[in-house]
Image (cartoon, rainbow, N blue to C red):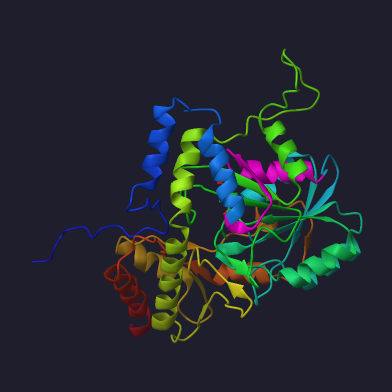
Amino acid sequence: MESIKVKERILLASPHMSDQGYEMEYVKEAFDTNWIAPLGENVNGFERELAEKVGSKAAAALSSGTAAIHLALIAAGVGEGDIVFCPTLTFSATANPIIYQNAIPVFIDSDYETWNISPKALKEAFEKYPEVKAVIVVHLYGLSADMDKIMDICKKHNVAVIEDAAESLGTYYKGKHTGTFGDYGIFSFNGNKIITASGGGMLVSNDEERIGKARFWATQSRDQAKHYQHSELGFNYRMSNVVAGIGRGQLKVLDQRVEKKRYIYEFYKRELGGLEGVEFMPSNEWDEPNCWLSSMVLTGKVRPIDVMEALEKENIESRPVWKPMHMQPFFEKYDFVGDGVSGKLFEDGVCLPSDTKMSVEDLVRVVKVIKGLWIE
Ligand SMILES: *Cc1c(COP(=O)(O)O)cnc(C)c1O
């Protein structure tokens, strides 16, 4: 008789609290001292510890990575009608804050070498739009963009650089942490990221004055006055002290999470990399990636949809590579510079389950399903 027992679901990426209970210790402290919200020692501690971890002078803990991008744009002076270059292959949260500022995104293509913003397309974009105000760089799936080339180009044009490192906490480019090359870097602690605080974000910069200003904007821009006085537009973007406690605890296991993510990537690459038409996300010698989501492109007979359907039948989650912003109904009216690499990556790409709680048996289960498609 066939077994009807449903196999346990394998997830793409889910929250993974420390075995030691670090998060609860910090959260308990917040409860014991009644510093539930707002702010408090966990917020200060999380800012200090994250800044130290990535090698940045200052950090502001915020309600989300999206809020951090928004404040970075404001800090960079982006306002109505300004042009902002943005990688097209990313999550919409990278691009939305450009619209919040009534600015104009110009979407830039990826290259196959990094899957990130193409230096060649970026150069072309500067020729077309020399008046550009800021450039956003994303480190997709925990792979670093080619920062030397990108920073060279941006420095020539004297433009603000914002790094969306939401997916790349723990990723280093030539020994320097992603998110610390540009004027501003942002991180996310959303539930599916490499570490999570249940939600939240961080804005980092070496400009302590600007970070102070970001904290001010994030708490409704309250002037130093006894009464409620406001000279600037404000936002309610600060992180709560409970959330920050979870983040502090998670930061202690970041290195372990990176190690596991890399193990998962190496496992898949070893087991699947030899199949016809399979190519894994790029590894460059200057990159020490956190391998947040292990992804591959399929250029042969087996298509991403075949892989995703076969996995789903076995109760295993997977998903396509991000759909480029210039192909999104909401953003398609904006300009795009490039020759379509991002579109190809979207068409051919699939993200495999990369949950750090996966066991070797789970990995074997995934690999077996995929290999089966090549045998048929
Ligand atoms: C998750 C993510 C964000 C947004 O972070 P939130 O904390 O969810 O607002 C931004 N950019 C990229 C590339 C992301 O993956």
Q: Residue at x 77, y 52 (%)?
A: 334
Asked whether the viewer can see residue 139, the reply is yes
- Which quadrant does the C terminus fall into? bottom left
Relative to residue 356, is residue 222 drawn left or right? right
Relative to residue 127, is residue 95 drawn left or right? left
Q: Is residue 105 above or below residue 368?
A: above
Q: Is residue 349 above or below residue 53?
A: below
Relative to residue 91, is residue 111 drawn left or right? right
Asked whether the viewer can see residue 118, the reply is no
Image position, residue 235 (x, y; %): 68, 30
Say which of 364 and 283 sits in front.
Answer: 283
Q: Is residue 348 above or below residue 322?
A: below
The span shown in magenta is: 53-76
Say which of 37 and 298 sits in front.
Answer: 37
The answer to if 58 sits in the magenta stretch is yes
The answer to if 131 sits in the magenta stretch is no
Q: Residue at x 34, y 47 (%)?
A: 21
When asked about the image quadrant of residue 288, the answer is bottom right
When asked about the image quadrant of residue 369, the answer is bottom left
Say which of 267 and 315 sits in front.
Answer: 267
Image position, residue 57 (x, y; %): 69, 51
Image position, residue 238 (x, y; %): 60, 34
Q: Is residue 9 above or below residue 28?
A: below
| Number of dots carrying numbers | 0
Q: Residue furthest top?
A: 227
Q: Residue at x 81, y 23 (%)?
A: 231
